[in-house]
Image: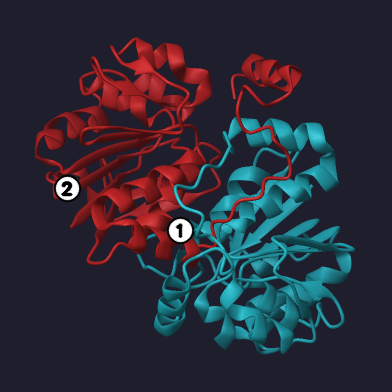
Chain colours: A cyan, B red
Amino acid sequence: MQIAIALFPEFTSLDAMGPYQVLQHVPGADLRLCAAERGIVADDSGHLRVEVEHTFADVPRPDVLVVPGGTVTRRMMTPEDAVVTWIREAHPHTTWTTSVCTGSLLLGAAGLLDGLTATTHWSAYDALASTGATPTEQRVVVEGKVVTGAGVSAGIDMALTLVAEMCGPEVAMAIQLGIEYDPQPPFDAGSPSTAPPAIRDGLLARSI
Amino acid sequence: MQIAIALFPEFTSLDAMGPYQVLQHVPGADLRLCAAERGIVADDSGHLRVEVEHTFADVPRPDVLVVPGGTVTRRMMTPEDAVVTWIREAHPHTTWTTSVCTGSLLLGAAGLLDGLTATTHWSAYDALASTGATPTEQRVVVEGKVVTGAGVSAGIDMALTLVAEMCGPEVAMAIQLGIEYDPQPPFDAGSPSTAPPAIRDGLLARSI
């Protein structure tokens, strides 16, 4: 089972690294980090520099396709973009096509979400709706073979949900226990409906 | 505020990438991924290859020191190990010295945990106790300026706790909302006390 996680300049690190940590433990997985070109791809903070060994052309037919997000994705929503092109051409052949955070905007730009319910980072519902999708605040949305996750850290929940669909709950629970995923956030501020309004508005003003 | 996250061959990716995602948003943070030598450092699955630009010698006095884990850490628990040496020499000057997962074994090997309560991955309590620490199942333990987090995904909770200590709860909540950390694991299997015993025993048998 080939699992391809797309990277691109200014991707958000945890969007990719959450699913990466979960999916590497799928039995028989042939996991690949891939990008438009071989070489170094830096994340949106610039501090994480990943040496990518596989191009999109090297993995044209992954069984599982994973697309992370980043604020840059809004500028990548064109048919000519390398990630969007790869998604559009690979999707008819995948078993699962998935995204985390604003990675769903790239699925949308590839024409995959028209008429589907999908999710994204809470600050990007309008951009998601522009692709024909119906945005929802649900953390993970399974629509046929298209699975979308909410912002950044939701990639862990998305990937565990995906593993349960692919391999059954026992495998997903074993991976969950292996990564000790028993989350205990110190605050109840992780969604726009629970965070203090002043904090939410401050983040929106800074476009984080 | 200089924040240094140590990498080493066969580190567990999310151990480092959880805190990395959180701490990069600390106001005024000078975040550095560092290792014994410049160049590529691969994680324990071998698929994530990080180009490291800073050596331990470049960051001898970080304000915040973060040590991830990996099964390899058990073999690194010697006074001569490069990570252990860096921890031992930097710790007297840090504001916070922290670990995720079996990174705490390296804090212990550096002599930092003798007589302290600390945590680690649930499969490594015995190894942690061998350093003089008192292991606990708590997800995040703050003992003076030493903060330890439990296995892999606990680095997110550890880092948010640390940000709240350093910068106050508003900053921590803003980062939590920015990364939409409103976790909803599909199963209640993330700790050895909640996972089905057969799954726990199976993982221990495979030494994951």
Quarter of the picture containing the C terminus of chain A is bottom left
Q: Is residue B165 above or below residue A13?
A: above
> What secondary structure is marked by label 2?
loop
Q: In the image, which is nearer the foreground, mark 1 or mark 2?
A: 2
Disc 2 crowd rating (10 Å Cα; few below 14, some 14-19, many 20+) is: many
Count all numbered tags in the image, as a single digit: 2
Identify which residue, A141 or B37, lies in the foreground.
Answer: A141
Q: Is residue B47 above or below residue A119?
A: above
Q: Is residue A53 visible?
A: no
Identify which residue, A194 or B62, lies in the foreground.
Answer: A194
Disc 1 crowd rating (10 Å Cα; few below 14, some 14-19, many 20+) is: many
Q: Position of residue A100 (x, y in %)?
A: 64, 64
Left or right of A146? Residue A45 is: left
User: Mark 2 belongs to which amino acid?
Assistant: Pro
> What secondary structure is marked by label 1?
strand
Say which mark, if any, is on residue B87. Answer: none
Identify which residue, A9 or B117, lies in the foreground.
Answer: B117
Say which mark, if any, is on residue A50. Answer: 1
Q: Which residue is mark 2?
A: B62
Q: Is residue A87 above or below residue B98?
A: below
Instruction: Name the residue at the left extreme.
Output: B93
Name which residue lies at 76% across and 49% down: A161
Identify which residue, B9 or A198, lies in the foreground.
Answer: A198
Left or right of A95? Residue B186 is: left
Name which residue lies at 21% across and 24% down: B112
User: Mark 1 belongs to which amino acid?
Assistant: Val
